[in-house]
Image (cartoon, coloured by chain):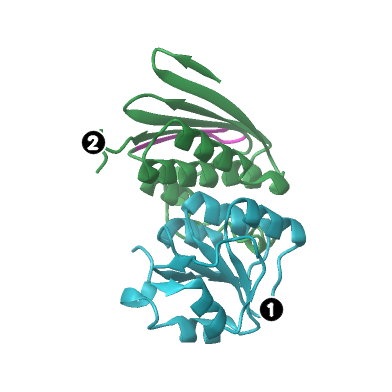
């Protein structure tokens, strides 16, 4: 389990959705740019790390019950996408770190490594 | 929307190529199933199956329709599209096999997991496809407590 505030500190992240709960926490972490993979393998309640910053990310997380998103390499979704996330109470974070660096920092901070379904 | 003999029914049109609306039907069906009081695991399985099917219609077909029927024991989802059809269904069921364009992949889809993932989230999946005409998917998801594995 890792808290939202710890994710922000660990990844030097910026919270894009100030209306979402600061008390959010994530049991697992899943990293992918492929929403197909998220739908296939990510577990409910996971935090998604991705380099994709479009509306499909928010929709995919909503459908598959993911609990938050980190956009890597400073990729910012459009304001309407941020608005959609806020209506779904989905916290969005942006970090300037690469996917590799962000994953490295997250590794070991979540129970059983945070891998998805197999 | 209609409820007849304890079965809730609603149908949703899907327009081929309308990427801006991708996921709208899946999100709507998810909300409906939650409102109907289905358990979270069944709602998630149905929402994922619908999202994958909806994306397939948007990516490959000209138009389609998703019919939802919810009985006390099962969720039935029928997806009919008018489009090129699937030439080799067995091949299309292979994880990783895809005919998606680079444009589709840039959106995060077309990884060749759509039909296999629909099957994974269904208890029953029937695919009837005719080349040059279209495809019909019949998906059955047993509600938790009603024989779901």
Judged from this view, the residue extending furthest toward the right is A79
Which labelled disc corresponds to residue B138?
A: none
Vertical arrangement, residue A56 with respect to residue B139, above or below: below
| B128 is within the stretch colored magenta | yes
x and y percentages locating residue B75 in the rendered image: 40, 31
Q: Colour of chain A?
A: cyan
Q: Colour of chain B?
A: green
What secondary structure is found at the residue carrying circle 1?
Answer: loop
Q: CA distance from mark 2 to mark 1?
A: 46 Å
Residue receiving disc 2: B147
Quadrant occupied by the N terminus of chain B: top right
x and y percentages locating residue B46 in the rendered image: 44, 41
Question: Which chain letter goes with mark 1?
Answer: A
Judge by depth and name the residue closer to the eye, A73 or B121.
Answer: A73
Judge by depth and name the residue closer to the eye, A65 or A22.
Answer: A22
Evaluate whether residue B134 shows in this view. Answer: yes
x and y percentages locating residue B47 in the rendered image: 48, 43
Residue receiving disc 1: A74
x and y percentages locating residue A76 in the rendered image: 71, 70
Judge by depth and name the residue closer to the eye, A85 or B11.
Answer: A85
The residue that appears at 40% across and 60% down in the rendered structure is A43
Q: Is residue B102 left or right of residue A42?
A: right
Vertical arrangement, residue B22 with respect to residue A31, above or below: above
Question: Which chain letter goes with mark 2?
Answer: B
Q: Is residue A88 left or right of residue B136?
A: right
The boundaries of the magenta stretch are B124-136
């Amino acid at each position: 389990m890792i808290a939202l505030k710890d994710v922000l500190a660990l990844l030097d992240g910026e919270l894009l959705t100030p209306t979402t709960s600061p008390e959010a926490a994530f049991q697992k972490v899943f990293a992918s740019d492929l929403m197909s993979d998220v739908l296939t393998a990510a577990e409910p309640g996971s935090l998604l790390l991705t380099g994709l910053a479009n509306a499909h990310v928010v929709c995919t997380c909503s459908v598959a019950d993911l609990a938050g998103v980190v956009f890597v390499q400073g990729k910012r979704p459009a304001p309407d996408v941020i608005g959609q996330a806020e209506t779904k109470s989905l916290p969005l974070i942006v970090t300037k770190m690469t996917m590799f660096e962000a994953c490295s920092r997250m590794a070991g901070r979540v129970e059983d490594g945070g891998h998805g379904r197999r | 929307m209609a409820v007849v003999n304890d079965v809730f029914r609603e149908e949703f049109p899907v327009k081929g190529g309308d990427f801006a609306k991708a996921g709208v039907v899946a999100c709507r069906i998810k909300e409906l199933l939650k409102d109907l009081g289905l358990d979270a695991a069944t709602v998630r399985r149905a929402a994922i199956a619908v999202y994958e099917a909806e994306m397939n219609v948007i990516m490959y077909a000209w138009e389609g329709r998703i019919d939802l029927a919810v009985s006390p024991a099962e969720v039935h989802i029928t997806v009919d599209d008018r489009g090129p059809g699937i030439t080799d269904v067995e091949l299309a069921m292979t994880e990783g096999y895809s005919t998606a364009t680079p444009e589709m992949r840039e959106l995060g889809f077309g990884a060749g997991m759509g039909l296999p993932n629909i099957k994974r989230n269904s208890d029953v999946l029937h695919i009837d496809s005719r080349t040059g005409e279209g495809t019909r998917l019949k998906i059955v998801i047993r509600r938790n407590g009603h024989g779901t594995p």
